[in-house]
Amino acid sequence: MNDTLQPELRYRIECLVLASEEPLLMKHAEKLLGNIPADEIRRAVAALNRENSEMGRSFTIVERGDSLIARTRDKFSELVTALTEERRRLTPSLLQTLAIIAYRQPITRAQLEQIRGVDCGYALGRLLNGGLVKIEGRAEKPGRPLLYGTSKDFLLYFGLSSIDELPRMDELELLATSIKRPRNSVYSLHTDEQESNAEHD
């Protein structure tokens, strides 16, 4: 790799990783960067991480599976947790939405809203951002709507080894309130107030 181009390549990779809403597939990165080989991308990422460490920047770029993702450095993790904790709390409405998804997955937004009788866009966004719900694919029906299901973090949150161990739906909230969270957990059950006006539920 031409050393004069290396800094530019580093920052282009950084830009792609930070702008991507999902983990950036290495194959996608190769294509976007002009068919640059994966090994060359890895070398540029390593150089970028060294530079960021020397500058004391707050994040690093890591490869997980076949994707690149940005990760906060350990010394900044408590600060990020404090920022995101409020966003990831489960209100009663979020817990109800999560329970429906857990027991009816995979489920579309329209099906979810038919059961709950309210718009669930806000709740879905919160659960997706919190990592408890994930997109499973698309339904084979007109418009091919997204299908939602629970994630591995959902199992960890409720102390389950598989979805087959789910308690009865009426036991789910009781279970959520009784679980002791790890000290650094960013999830907590929020029951001392109802939905904010923004939820429109």
Image (cartoon, grey):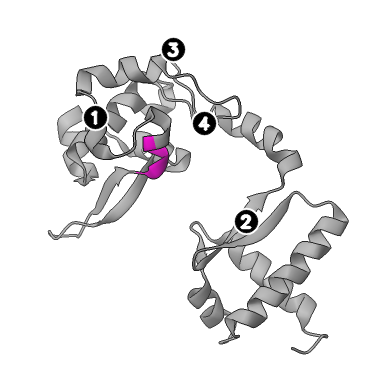
Q: Which residue shows up at 42% across the image and 35% down it?
A: 156
Q: Residue 60, how many percent across, how many down?
A: 70, 56
Name the amino acid type tagged 3: Glu
Residue 99's place in the image compared with 175, above or below, is below
Question: Which residue is nearer to you in this view: 129 or 69?
Answer: 69
> SS at mark 2?
strand
Q: Which mark is nearer the camera, 1 or 4?
A: 4
| Res. 70 mark | 2
Q: CA distance from mark 3 to mark 1?
A: 19 Å
Q: Which quadrant of the figure contains the N terminus?
A: bottom right
Q: CA distance from mark 1 to mark 2?
A: 35 Å
Q: Which residue shows up at 43% across the image and 19% down it?
A: 179
Which residue does the numbered mark 4 point to in the structure image? 87
The reply to whether discs 3 and 1 touch (Cβ–Cβ < 8 Å) is: no
Which residue does the numbered mark 3 point to in the structure image? 193
Q: Which mark is nearer the camera, 3 or 2?
A: 2
Q: Which mark is nearer the camera, 2 or 4?
A: 2
Q: CA distance from mark 3 to mark 2?
A: 34 Å
Image quarter of residue 98: top left
Which residue does the numbered mark 1 point to in the structure image? 118
Name the amino acid type tagged 4: Arg
On whether residue 154 falls in the magenta region, the answer is: yes
Q: CA distance from mark 2 to mark 4?
A: 20 Å
> SS at mark 1?
loop
Q: Residues within 10 Å of mark 1 (few under 14, many from 20)?
A: few
Farthest-out residue, right: 54
Q: Residues within 10 Å of mark 2 (few under 14, many from 20)?
A: some
Residues in magenta?
151-155
> SS at mark 3?
loop
Q: Which residue shows up at 49% across the image and 75% down it?
A: 28
Could you tell me if residue 11 is visible in this image? no
Name the amino acid type tagged 1: Val
